[in-house]
Amino acid sequence: MSRPVDPSRTPLTRNPLATPQAVSNEAEPFPSTTGAAPHETGFADWRRRLTGNLSRRSDGRWVPLTRTHGPEQAAGPEV
């Protein structure tokens, strides 16, 4: 019996027969600045996050070390 597919989870691998449209609909793997979110800020606990990323088995799932945000959130607390 198979488990139901959770669409919120990102698969670890891409289907080799994926169409260009399916690939373009995937979320970006790394935060990147845009016009709406032109700032990139590091998390306060980036050292713990990096240590965790490096100590886990490499399965392609890394906890992000930075976040992108708009100018109104630049002075806000880091997550």
Image: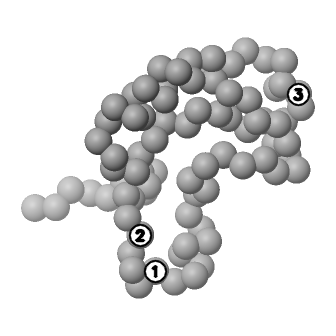
Q: Is residue 39 left or right of residue 29?
A: right
Q: Who is closer to the viewer here, 40 or 25?
A: 40
Q: Is residue 14 left or right of residue 75?
A: left
Q: Residue furthest left?
A: 1
What element does badge 2 sit on?
A: loop
Q: Earlier in the sequence, mark 3 or mark 1?
A: 1
**Disc 3 residue type (three-letter):** Glu
**Disc 1 residue type (three-letter):** Ala
Total number of numbered discs in the rendering: 3
Q: Position of residue 44 (x, y in %)?
A: 63, 17
Proximity of marks 1 and 2: CB atoms separated by less than 8 Å: yes
Q: Earlier in the sequence, mark 2 or mark 3?
A: 2
* Residue under numbered circle 2: 14
Give the Cα distance between marks 3 and 1: 38 Å
* Residue under numbered circle 3: 72
Q: Position of residue 18 (x, y in %)?
A: 46, 80
Q: Is residue 34 above or below residue 20?
A: above
User: Which residue occupies 82% across, 36% down?
Assistant: 39
User: Which residue occupies 34% across, 31% down?
Assistant: 55
Give the Cα distance between marks 2 and 3: 36 Å
Q: Nearer the viewer, mark 2 or mark 3?
A: 2
Q: Is residue 33 left or right of residue 17?
A: right
Circle 1: is it few (<14), some (14-19), or many (20+) Cα within 10 Å?
A: few
**Disc 2 residue type (three-letter):** Arg
- In which quadrant of the rendered view does residue 69 lie? top right
* Residue under numbered circle 1: 18
- In which quadrant of the rendered view does residue 75 lie? top right
Circle 3: is it few (<14), some (14-19), or many (20+) Cα within 10 Å?
A: few
Proximity of marks 2 and 3: CB atoms separated by less than 8 Å: no
Quarter of the figure that contains the C terminus: top right
Q: Who is closer to the viewer here, 54 or 13?
A: 54
What element does badge 1 sit on?
A: loop
